[in-house]
Amino acid sequence: MKITKKIASKYEDFIFDWNYETYLLFGGYGSGKSYHIAFKIILKLLEERRKALVVRQVFDTIQESCYDLFCEILDDMRLLTTDYTEYKRDRNKVYARKSPLSFTFHNGSKIIFKGMDKPEKAKSINNVSILWIEECTEIKFEAYEELLGRVRTPIASMHFILSCNPVGKENWVYSHFFRKLNDDGTEDVIMDEERLYEAGCLVRGDVYYLHSLPTDNNWLPRKYIKRLDDIRTYDPQLYNVARWGRFGATGTRVLPQFEIASNARKFREAIKALGDSNKYFGFDFGFEESYNAVVSMAVDIQNSILYIYDEIYVNHVTDDKMAELPQMQMLKDKLDAMAEAGHNNAVIIADNEDPKAIQYYRQCQFRIRACKNKFAGSRLSNTRKIKRFKHIIVSPKCKNVIRELKDLTYKKDRNGNVIYDEFNIDPHTFSAIWYALDTVTVADVKHDFNSKAG
């Protein structure tokens, strides 16, 4: 069967190259990494009987990213079917299943998917000869080592493909593939990244390095590039990552776009202009060492701005006393008024791990429900969601929001690697913000473009 398909010239050699054990693809947003990796794997599995494993940190993100990407490419090649009867009848078809997520080829090849948020499931893999770790900077180095030990087969060559948008140089991907800091303070240069940025593609030992830019993707519209260029005005560090795909740009501060409102009148007018339909309320429960944190905010989706205008922050307070606080009663009255006006967002969204507390507040006539966005691995995805705002503007009266978030930084492990789902403090107001915005979609710079954007 002859297959004709256009690919970006940047990836022509990569698509057909299987001479190396490890392939590291990294670069700017929309540069086509994921698309061409998926296509490369499909071609190999059509040619040879192999099993490929695709891994991300959070399994819940795989279907809408990697799995859908394979579906799109196979459908474009006229190979995809979700009908098992059609698959059995037509030997050119590849059968896609959603439970469990997988693709089956007629020659016996398979693609399976795992999430490292449930590492015990990765222990059940066998006879895998191709491993793709998407967004490899999200997983921990220990998980990477576990995968290297688990993925093996005696009947075929082994290949490990890693892809990511680069993050800080504190990440294990940088120290493992570029520069390693020794215990005595000296540095071993594994790959000179500046040389790689200039060359675009280099090989060191058994590792194939490919660095790509958005302009390497022939399918990106000009407005996408402009969106990336606009990042420079509000987050220069992210700009170096998104536009130029360079390591060491993000630093360790979690919310570099965080700012305190300097003009009270303009701040109030901005929130008033957004109206009650754009207001959200989050509640993180606490008592002994942690705090009850209730945060009120308004969202300007069009301009990607989060306004935080009020907070309630107390501990050593039982639920009955909390419910009686004047600030809580004022919030309750506000939500009742919003509901009477027909606003569906007239509700406090709270931590789903304390259903007993939520039920108590309901009995006290508070409009409140459990959040939907707290699950294994959700800290990372929720943090990234809030980071998509171009500006986070906070009222000066929200002293605890400012104290917790203004200089919030990521934790580091004992080797100095940044842990992107752990922080230097336990920021209760940050959790309240996550919960409040659990149904709000914050546009990513990658949003609204097809999968060739990578």
Image (spheres, rainbow, N blue to C red):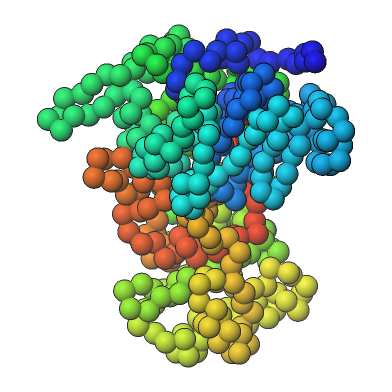
Q: Residue at x 69, y 37 (%)?
A: 103
Relative to 307, is 356 above or below?
A: below
Where is residue 97? Give x, y as percent: 73, 44
Identify the image quadrant of residue 236: top left
Q: Residue at x 45, y 41 (%)?
A: 138
Say if residue 11 shows up in the picture: no
Relative to 202, is 254 above or below?
A: below
Identify the image quadrant of the C terminus.
top right
Identify the image quadrant of residue 367: bottom right
Q: Residue at x 45, y 60 (%)?
A: 430
Of residue 184 and residue 88, the one placed in the foreground of this image is 88
Where is residue 375? Give x, y as percent: 53, 60
Would residue 45 be found to the left or right of residue 316 on screen? right
Of residue 380 and residue 23, the one placed in the foreground of this image is 23
Say if residue 13 shows up in the picture: yes
Identify the image quadrant of the N terminus.
top right
